Image (spheres, rainbow, N blue to C red):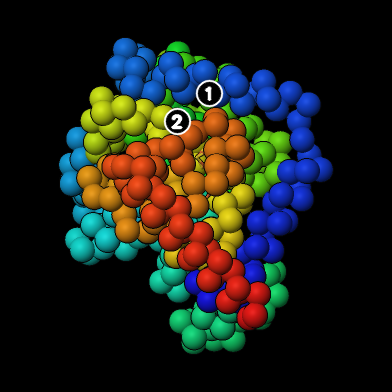
Amino acid sequence: MNFDEIIALRKAFAYVKDRQAKNVPPDLKEKMRRVRNIRESSVGNEALLKQAIRKLEQNGIRVFRAADKHDACKMILQEIGNEKLAVKSKSNVTKEIDLTSALESHGIKVIETDIGDRILQVLGRKPSHPTGPAAHLSARKIAEGLSRYYGTDIGQEPEDIVSFMRDEIAGYLKKAQTGITGANAVTAEEGSILLAHNEGNIFEVIRRKKHIVVTAIDKVYPSVEEALNMLKVISFHATGSLIPSFVEIISGVSKTADVEKKFFKGVHAPEDVVVILLDNRRTEMIANGFRELLYCIDCGNCLLHCPMYGTIGNDFAEEKYLGGKGLAYKSIAEKEVSKKLEFCLTCGRCRKNCPLSIDAPAIIKSIRSESLPEEVYYFLKSHLLWLYYHVRLKVG
Ligand code: SF4
Ligand code: SF4
């Protein structure tokens, strides 16, 4: 990231922190404790997962379990069939399986419908935050890049950019028959899929003829009530608001039996909902003692408080794996320790500001060094690196 991008990122992060400070819910601690307890009892709970699958299927939703990314991409390709266009909403699991490149290599055009994600897709840039992916780009930079890409002059005010992108995305939404989303939660009691959004794009993505939900086995919650509590905790920590603008609770397909009690699917849309539940080494991670990493609800609050991330931004990241927690996850899931973990100062601010108190620094220490002298070396190296970049940032 360059100097301007770090400044833009810091500004965006300061804005979220300010909103958080003005908006603290009175029972936030209790809500956080509840999410932690639920994650402890649900992640890796095969009986709960099986109950969720059974309930989803009873609701008319087709469910598949994918062992790895190749498996998942193959299933999704089969579901898309001969269609040449798919619209999608923000989803970390689709990034994990490199879904867009897999579909594009089969001639399927994939359009992101979240404004920030579509901007990054067009500009070919990396995200800097799980829910505010373009937080590091100024409106001027975005307008310049988009104007070059589309060959037309786009105004430099945020409103001009949003209005241009919204119209562009709307054109694809009208044509697409397949909508792909992630899921914030899948519930065992009701067999429901929960999706939170602020932009309203998900209304349209899930109303395609076919809705494909790409999620992971660790997204199971016992009930809608517990999932909603988690969404409030994410919302506050990701954006500083008490609840997202919209929460979709999907528990079936569009159907009716209003005329002579004859049952029809697909009155409006979707007529088909498919859930892909990805493992991709999660079961192995749990068995190897890294269950805590899977408790993460992707709120991104750890990034807002990480001194290294605030100094070098998403250079302390690899693809969608942002900051210390993200890199620790990638290192374990891909069985190759990321070189970028040497940037971690093991200061503990991420753990302190994590709503689930996930101890990323302890996990980082355990995977990047095998002995105390080695950890002393990393401690000194990370602090020197931080000082170097910090001074460079200060002198501009
Ligand atoms: S411990 Fe590492 S990842 Fe966590 S806040 Fe400090 S520098 Fe960032
Ligand atoms: S580690 Fe904690 S703070 Fe960071 S994204 Fe996950 S839940 Fe949020």
Would residue 55 appear left or right of 169 to someone viewing this image? left
| Amino acid type indicated by mark 1 | Arg
Residue located beneath label 1 in the image: 36
Q: Marks 1/2: CA distance?
A: 7 Å
- Could you tell me if the residues under marks 1 and 2 are in contact, i.e. CB atoms within 8 Å? yes
Above or below, 51 against 384 in this view is above
> What residue sits 45% from the left and 53% below the top?
379
Residue 213: x and y, percent? Answer: 37, 39
Q: For residue 371, which quarter of the picture?
A: top left
Give the SS element for disc 1.
helix
Residue at the image position 78 percent from the left and 43 percent from the top: 21
At x 61%, y 51%, the residue is 304
Provide residue 307's location: percent of width, then percent of height.
58, 56
Residue 17, how many percent across, how many down? 71, 49
Q: Residues within 10 Å of mark 1 (few under 14, many from 20)?
A: many
Location of mark 2 (residue): 295
Task: Specify whether residue 282 is in view.
Answer: yes
Question: Count of labels shown?
Answer: 2
Find out if the beta carbon at label 2 lies less than 8 Å from the nearest ligand 2 atom.
Answer: yes
Give the residue type at disc 2. Tyr
Query: Of 236 and 115, which appears nearest the observer?
Result: 236
Vertical order, 326 against 162 (above or below)? above
Image x and y of residue 7, in percent: 64, 70
Which residue is painted at 49% across and 46% down in the image?
Answer: 346
Q: Hey, which quadrant is residue 284 in on the image?
A: top left
